[in-house]
Amino acid sequence: MPAKYTLTVLTDFAAAHTLRGYPGDCSRMHGHNWKLEAEVQATALDDVGMAVDFKVIKQAAREIAGELDHHYLNDLPAFARVNPTAEQIAAYIYQRLGERLNTGQVRVSAVTLWETERACVRYSEEA
Ligand SMILES: Nc1nc2c(c(=O)[nH]1)N=C([C@H](O)[C@H](O)COP(=O)(O)OP(=O)(O)OP(=O)(O)O)CN2
Ligand SMILES: [Zn+2]
């Protein structure tokens, strides 16, 4: 079996959202301190012995999180028609991170988004 390295970087952002159509309190505007885990996989190491520099993953994750930070997510184009649930925010971040980080040997493999200290969603497109 080929070697596989899985790297995870953590970042966070604070944002507000409203869940349209939700049968409960979350249909009113409220906020969360979201915790984002960006997971990247690689099958080879570079000459320095790194799959990919953590700094590179951190920079991409922080930039994407920064675009959400201190925003009302429903106002952003990505969530104008799509409810900003944890699932759909995680999928959005996964796509954006992939655009930034995916190369021949490096792939974004999952995004885990913690909405509260007790609840998270892990989004992946792997079988
Ligand atoms: N599958 C999902 N379920 C829920 C989502 C979601 O994005 N995906 N979102 C919410 C709301 O955003 C809500 O703010 C979360 O609140 P809740 O789970 O009630 O968390 P609390 O910690 O405030 O509540 P406790 O009941 O005290 O744990 C809801 N569900
Ligand atoms: Zn919420």
Image (spheres, rainbow, N blue to C red):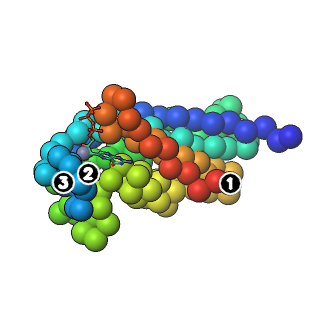
The furthest residue to the front:
23
Viewer-proximal residue among 59 and 120: 120
Disc 1: CA contacts within 10 A as few (<14), some (14-19) or many (>=20) = few
Q: CA distance from mark 2 to mark 3?
A: 19 Å
Q: Quadrant of ligand 1?
A: top left
Specify whether 59 is left or right of 98.
left
Q: Are marks 1 and 2 in contact (CB under 8 Å)?
A: no
Ligand 1 within 8 Å of disc 1? The answer is no
In this rendering, which labeled residue sits more in front, label 1 or label 2? Answer: 1
Provide residue 99's location: percent of width, then percent of height: 49, 61
Viewer-proximal residue among 36 and 74: 74
Residue to which mark 1 is pinned: 127
How many badges with numbers are in the image?
Answer: 3
Viewer-proximal residue among 34 and 108: 34
| Residue type at tag 2 | Leu
Specify whether 86 is left or right of 7.
left
| Residue type at tag 3 | Ser
Vertical order, 57 against 103 (above or below): above
Ligand 1 within 8 Å of disc 3? The answer is no
Specify whether 88 is left or right of 29.
right
Question: Which residue is pictured at 32% across the width and 66% down the height?
Answer: 82
Residue to which mark 2 is pinned: 68
